[in-house]
């Protein structure tokens, strides 16, 4: 039985004494009891959880002094005030009762004829018995929960045990508020909630909550919470270590596939099944590459790059489902995620594009200072095709970034015929073609520091539409007209001829790929 104000009044030494005001504090825990007749500077002497026995000799019928006594005891978080009313007061002042009710500090009408020392001795004995009971309770909970930990049982078994021991509804959540385990019937209790953070190495990693009938909840429930938080911390830390180990193993396996370190089909199957990865499922692959310098133009430091990698992984976890495998290698975030592969191949590719767009949006929001280009490879029908899909995603970033610009999402299928030109980019014949058609413009831009080649590309992309070109370049049409005349002179040919149009536009695109 807890050492509360209402429970100590059941001791025979109190002789039927009752609470007359401040009833809401009847469940205050009693930690000690004392006798006091001098009330000057009371705040220096009283302690939290203390019950004061007094006959009010020093205040007698001074209502203001008695109210001051209640105020100071409330501030000190005392448990209750027991007054021997008949000796000097006769009746308890109405002002005192009113303040007691407002502050929730119980005032007891002490009617017993037993000496104060006998009453105090009985209360102290009751407190000692309660502390022994509390200690036994704590030890029994510790033993029960320790058995579960040593038996390698999970969080669900732990909350099941806590719910049974405490006759309560128990919830464990992670640091983000996500439900990890629960037990008991929440609807069967009035929702009085006690919570305690789950911490490990001074970091909050979760929270444990206990819901119980308002009339049953007490100090012993705090003991339950303390043990639950300790055991949950150990369990969550163990899960974190296992998850990190599993994550590294899965990420290393995917990197080995991408790097071509594993090509044997049987070895791929055995390792994938060991890591709980279905080898013959369909997979989508996305690569996000960030540049070594941010939008500010300055090179990023090592600490900044590591912080970016950590943030990229968080964004990937938030964007893709839990079965996705994420890893950061050098300047690339690689994400492999399961897809439902059907005869409608475009539907699977559409899903991959939507996820890639969500990833890019998340990166742009969380890391606005970096330039990130997201590439999408073709859907893999098995793990053996991952290397090919990765190469396609990287090609989409390299070639697509040159043609369409960086800081966007580019699929391998967006490249069209240009993806066929990637192996040819270093061949002399290709460079000769580029020089033949646009070499004079390239040399002019290099010497004068101009950007006529960009103007030429936009002009041809818009099918020689002057208004659309001027809008895209943010220049006046007269300025554009001057640049077009200059380009015609440098090229030595007209741009209106469809054959010339195609040859020059292809040369511009090839130049961007090969430079």
Image (cartoon, rainbow, N blue to C red):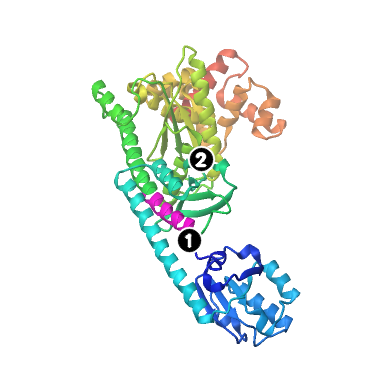
Kindly indicate whether the residue at mark 2 contacts the one at mark 1 (C-beta within 8 angstroms): no
The foreground one among 15 and 154 is 15
The foreground one among 307 and 105 is 105
Sequence-first tag of 1 and 2 = 1
The stretch in magenta equals: 219-234
Q: Is residue 298 magenta?
A: no
Q: Position of residue 36 (x, y in %)?
A: 57, 83
| Distance between the alpha carbons at the discs numbered 1 and 2 | 65 Å
Mark 2 surroundings within 10 Å by alpha-carbon count, few (fewer than 14), some (14 through 19), many (20 or more)? some
Write down the residue under mark 1. Answer: 1
Position of residue 39 in the picture relative to residue 195 (left or right): right
Please, which residue is most extreme toward the right here? 94
Mark 1 surroundings within 10 Å by alpha-carbon count, few (fewer than 14), some (14 through 19), many (20 or more)? few
Specify the principal SS of the magenta part.
helix
Write down the residue under mark 2. Answer: 371
Q: Residue at x 46, y 69 (%)?
A: 127
Where is 51 relative to 486, above or below? below
Q: Position of residue 205 (x, y in %)?
A: 45, 50
Total numbered labels: 2
For the C terminus, the quadrant is top left
Q: Position of residue 394 (x, y in %)?
A: 42, 29
Q: Residue at x 56, y 24 (%)?
A: 491
């Amino acid at each position: 039985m807890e050492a509360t104000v209402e429970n100590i009044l059941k001791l025979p030494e109190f002789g039927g004494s009752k609470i007359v005001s401040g009833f809401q504090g009847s469940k205050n825990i009693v930690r000690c009891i004392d006798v006091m007749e001098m009330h000057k500077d009371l705040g220096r002497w009283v302690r939290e959880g203390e019950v004061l026995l007094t006959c009010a000799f020093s205040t007698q019928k001074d209502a203001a002094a008695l109210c001051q006594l209640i105020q100071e005891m409330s501030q000190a978080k005392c448990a209750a005030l027991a007054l021997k009313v008949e000796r000097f007061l006769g009746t308890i002042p109405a002002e005192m009762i009113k303040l007691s009710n407002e502050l929730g500090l119980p005032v007891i009408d002490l009617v017993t004829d037993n000496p104060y020392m006998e009453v105090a001795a009985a209360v102290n004995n009751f407190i000692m018995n309660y502390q022994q009971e509390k200690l036994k309770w704590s030890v029994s909970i510790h033993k029960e929960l320790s058995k579960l930990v040593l038996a390698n049982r999970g969080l669900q078994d732990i909350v099941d045990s806590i719910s049974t021991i405490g006759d309560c509804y128990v919830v464990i959540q992670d640091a983000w508020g996500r439900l990890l385990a629960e037990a008991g019937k929440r609807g069967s209790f009035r929702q009085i909630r006690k919570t305690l953070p789950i911490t490990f190495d001074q970091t909050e990693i979760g929270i444990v909550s206990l819901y119980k009938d308002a009339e049953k909840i007490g100090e012993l429930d705090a003991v339950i919470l303390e043990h639950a938080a300790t055991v949950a911390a150990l369990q969550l830390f163990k899960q974190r270590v296992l998850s990190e180990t599993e994550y590294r193993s899965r990420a290393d396996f995917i990197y080995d596939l991408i790097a071509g370190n594993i090509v044997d089909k049987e070895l791929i199957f055995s390792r994938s099944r060991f890591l709980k990865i279905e080898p013959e499922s369909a997979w989508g692959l996305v690569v996000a590459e960030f540049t070594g310098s941010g939008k500010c133009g300055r090179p990023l430091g090592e600490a900044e790059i590591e912080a970016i990698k950590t943030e990229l992984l968080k964004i990937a976890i938030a964007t893709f489902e839990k079965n996705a495998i994420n890893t950061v290698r050098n300047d690339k975030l690689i994400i492999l995620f399961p897809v439902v592969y059907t005869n409608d191949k475009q539907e699977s590719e559409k899903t991959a594009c939507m996820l890639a767009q969500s990833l890019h949006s998340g990166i742009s929001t969380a890391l606005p200072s970096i330039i990130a280009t997201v590439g999408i490879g073709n859907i893999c029908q098995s793990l053996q095709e991952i290397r090919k899909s990765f190469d396609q995603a990287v090609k989409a970033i390299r070639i697509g970034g040159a043609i369409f610009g960086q800081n966007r999402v580019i699929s391998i299928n967006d490249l069209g015929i240009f993806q066929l030109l990637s192996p040819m980019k270093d061949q002399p014949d290709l460079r000769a073609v580029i020089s033949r058609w646009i070499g004079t413009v390239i040399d002019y831009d290099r010497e004068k520091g101009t950007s006529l080649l960009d103007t030429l590309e936009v002009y041809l992309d818009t099918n020689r539409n002057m208004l659309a070109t001027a809008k895209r370049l943010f220049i006046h049409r007269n300025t554009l007209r001057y640049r077009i005349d200059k380009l015609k002179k440098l090229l030595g040919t007209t741009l209106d001829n469809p054959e010339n149009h195609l040859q020059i536009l292809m040369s511009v695109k090839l130049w961007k790929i090969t430079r």
